[in-house]
Image (spheres, rainbow, N blue to C red):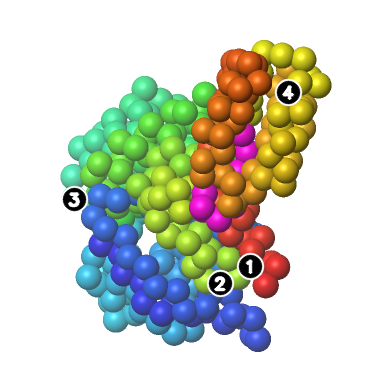
């Protein structure tokens, strides 16, 4: 549905986007991540046709955005970080206005359809300015759906929301992903991990990583230091004597009644088994042993810090 090839954007001497290539398939939700200044927002602005590219190619639904910008933009529904709402209008007035701009033929029927999809049917008669943050964001979603675009580009859709509103919008994005191709940008990494089929991480204008959230965590797990929490039934002197016998396989720190082990990469694979037998030999029962999972946040930090170190 979306094809990006060798995309480049210069701002004077600065190369904000440096030759990136990626695709987004029909019905896929792509999470778009990157630290400030990574080129993420610039890329999204080029995808929507808001700014021009220096070089490269963007196709939306097979339509080249340079050769046929109007045709490509008809395929896109865009929700910016601050939806362009008119607070003095009622919700129905605003959605009808957007439908008219999009060239919708049966405006009333389509307005009611997108209102139902986004859960704003009950507030159609209310002024936009009197709505809560969550409902205003839903109205923005409805406006992005006007004209039934095949692609939805959502920039920070949950910014400024409380946890309950975030959960509502998360469910809405999941439901929209069943019928539309979605690109979702957010600084809340848990949101990206919760709703995305695939994640693309940008750094310094380039693609640092691209895969499913699960595969990214799995691949990064092999290269990063891992941690393990253990709880042992015994005196601290006895426990630490066993831990010390492992030499430089890990460092450890006591946290209340637990010990947190920071494992060296070489020792991480079978350390759990070795700990079990070592404490069994010392007749100290292991009450709890848990390896801490690598999260998308860990992957993001590791990748962007690697680039900084280079």
Tell me which label, 4 or 2, sits earlier in the chain. 2
* Residue found farthest to the front: 281
The residues bearing labels 3 and 2 have C-alpha atoms spaced at a distance of 41 Å
Residue 221 belongs to the span the image colors magenta: yes
The residues bearing labels 3 and 1 have C-alpha atoms spaced at a distance of 50 Å
- Name the residue at 69% across, 67% down: 308
The residues bearing labels 1 and 4 have C-alpha atoms spaced at a distance of 39 Å
In this rendering, the label closer to the viewer, 3 or 1: 1
Pointers 3 and 1 in contact (CB under 8 A)?
no
SS state under label 1: helix
Depicted 161 relative to depicted 299: above or below: above
- Name the residue at 66% across, 21% down: 282
Residue 205 is labelled as 2
Instruction: Give coordinates of residue 99: x percent, y percent.
Output: 30, 48
- Name the residue at 48% across, 62% down: 209
- Name the residue at 75% across, 35% down: 244
Which quarter of the rendering shows the N terminus?
A: bottom left
In this rendering, the label closer to the viewer, 4 or 3: 4
Q: Write down the residue under mark 4.
A: 239
Tell me which label, 3 or 1, sits earlier in the chain. 3
In this rendering, the label closer to the viewer, 1 or 2: 1
Q: Write down the residue under mark 3.
A: 105
Q: Quadrant of residue 118?
A: top left
Q: Write down the residue under mark 1.
A: 307
Q: Quadrant of residue 39?
A: bottom right
Pointers 1 and 2 in contact (CB under 8 A)?
no
Instruction: Give coordinates of residue 290: x percent, y percent.
Output: 56, 28
Instruction: Give coordinates of residue 218: x percent, y percent.
Output: 45, 48
The residues bearing labels 4 and 2 have C-alpha atoms spaced at a distance of 49 Å
For the question of whether residue 94 can be seen, the reply is: no
The residue closer to the viewer here, 271 or 40, is 271
């Amino acid at each position: 549905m979306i094809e990006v090839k060798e995309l480049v954007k210069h701002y004077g001497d600065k190369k904000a986007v440096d030759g990136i290539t990626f695709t987004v398939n029909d019905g896929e939700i792509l999470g778009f991540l990157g630290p400030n200044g990574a080129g993420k927002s610039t890329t999204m602005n080029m995808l929507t046709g808001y700014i021009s590219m220096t070089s490269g190619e963007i196709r939306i639904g097979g339509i080249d955005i340079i050769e046929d910008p109007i045709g490509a933009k008809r395929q896109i529904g865009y929700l910016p970080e601050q939806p362009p709402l008119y607070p003095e209008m009622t919700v129905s007035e605003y959605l009808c206005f957007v439908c008219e701009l999009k060239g919708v033929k049966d405006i009333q029927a389509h307005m009611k359809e997108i209102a139902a999809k986004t859960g704003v049917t009950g507030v159609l008669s209310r002024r936009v300015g009197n709505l809560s943050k969550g409902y205003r964001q839903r109205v923005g979603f409805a406006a992005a759906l006007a004209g039934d675009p095949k692609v939805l580009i959502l920039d920070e859709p949950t910014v400024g929301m409380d946890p309950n509103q975030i959960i509502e919008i998360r469910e809405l994005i999941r439901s929209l992903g069943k019928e539309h191709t979605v690109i979702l940008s957010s600084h809340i990494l848990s949101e990206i991990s919760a709703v995305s089929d695939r994640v693309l991480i940008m750094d310094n204008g380039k693609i640092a990583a691209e895969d499913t959230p699960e595969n990214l965590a799995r691949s990064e797990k092999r290269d990063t230091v891992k941690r393990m929490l253990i709880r042992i039934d015994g005196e601290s002197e006895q426990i630490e004597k066993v831990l010390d016998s492992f030499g430089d396989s890990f460092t450890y720190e006591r946290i209340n009644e637990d010990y947190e082990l920071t494992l060296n990469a070489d020792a991480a694979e079978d350390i759990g088994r070795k700990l079990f037998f070592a404490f069994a030999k010392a007749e100290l029962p292991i009450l709890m042993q848990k390896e801490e999972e690598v999260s998308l946040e860990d992957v993001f930090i590791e990748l962007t810090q690697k680039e900084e170190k280079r």
